[in-house]
Amino acid sequence: MIGELLEGNQRFVENEFNANLAYYHTIAAAQSPKILWIGCSDSRVSEDVVTGSKPGTIFVHRNVANNVAFNDVNVASLIQYAIIHLKIPDIVVCGHTKCGGIRAIEEGVNDDFIADWLLIAQGAKEKTDRIAAEQGLNLEQKLEVLTRENIRLQIKHLTSIGFIKRHRNKTGLPRVHGWLYSVDSGKIEVIVDGNAVPPVA
Ligand SMILES: [Zn+2]
């Protein structure tokens, strides 16, 4: 498999990079991405591929279950860099169907680090438990609701981070969008329309 990746890189250099040298030299001089993507680490949800984007378009943070950990210097520093230095106007929080992280939130998991990490999504589980009880949802339906609720919760975390809140109040940016990618259809559904949401958190 490793050999295939290196062969794939050779094809990329020959068919894509060298065929678009001016573009790649421009982004080599300085990146200027327009989107910050916060997504799941799942191998099926490659942000460049599923949005038809070239390298240089999307600044990326991915983790298990596309969480925004409000006490995590990793994600906070990346968001700060994206907003303050790259001046990225739009953030996408993208969840996806059949997410192993979402299933682990619902069913519980014994691995310490994974369980700790998924506590960040606990509020989404509590809300989903209430909805599932009211509507009598089966497991698959419940997982779909949980996936959607977690996107909304992580947007709430994101927009509650102090400097993001202040920046949005002052400038109206960044806009924050919630998307759901289907691993079955390849399609993206807009869950939260960042263009429609008032910027003041
Ligand atoms: Zn996932």
Image (cartoon, grey):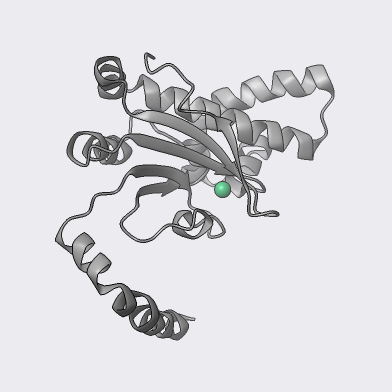
Query: Looking at the image, which residue is at 58% across and 35% down?
Result: 190
Query: Looking at the image, which residue is at 47% across and 20% down?
Result: 197
Residue 160, percent across and down? 37, 20
Q: Locate the C terminus and report the quarter of the image it occupies.
A: top left
**Is residue 109 in view from this perspective?**
no
Q: Is residue 125 left or right of residue 194?
A: right
Residue 140, percent across and down? 77, 40
Query: Looking at the image, which residue is at 47% across and 32% down?
Result: 177
Q: Is residue 117 left or right of residue 162?
A: right
- Where 169 sits versus 140, above or below? above
Residue nearest the observer in this picture, 195 or 48 = 195
Residue nearest the observer in this picture, 178 or 158 = 178
Q: Is residue 103 left or right of residue 200?
A: right
**Is residue 184 in view from this perspective?**
yes
Q: Quadrant location of residue 53?
A: bottom left
- Where 82 sits versus 62, above or below? above
Q: Residue furthest left?
A: 29
Query: Looking at the image, which residue is at 54% across and 47% down?
Result: 111
Residue 186, percent across and down? 63, 54
Q: Is residue 12 left or right of residue 109?
A: left
Residue 188, percent across and down? 59, 45
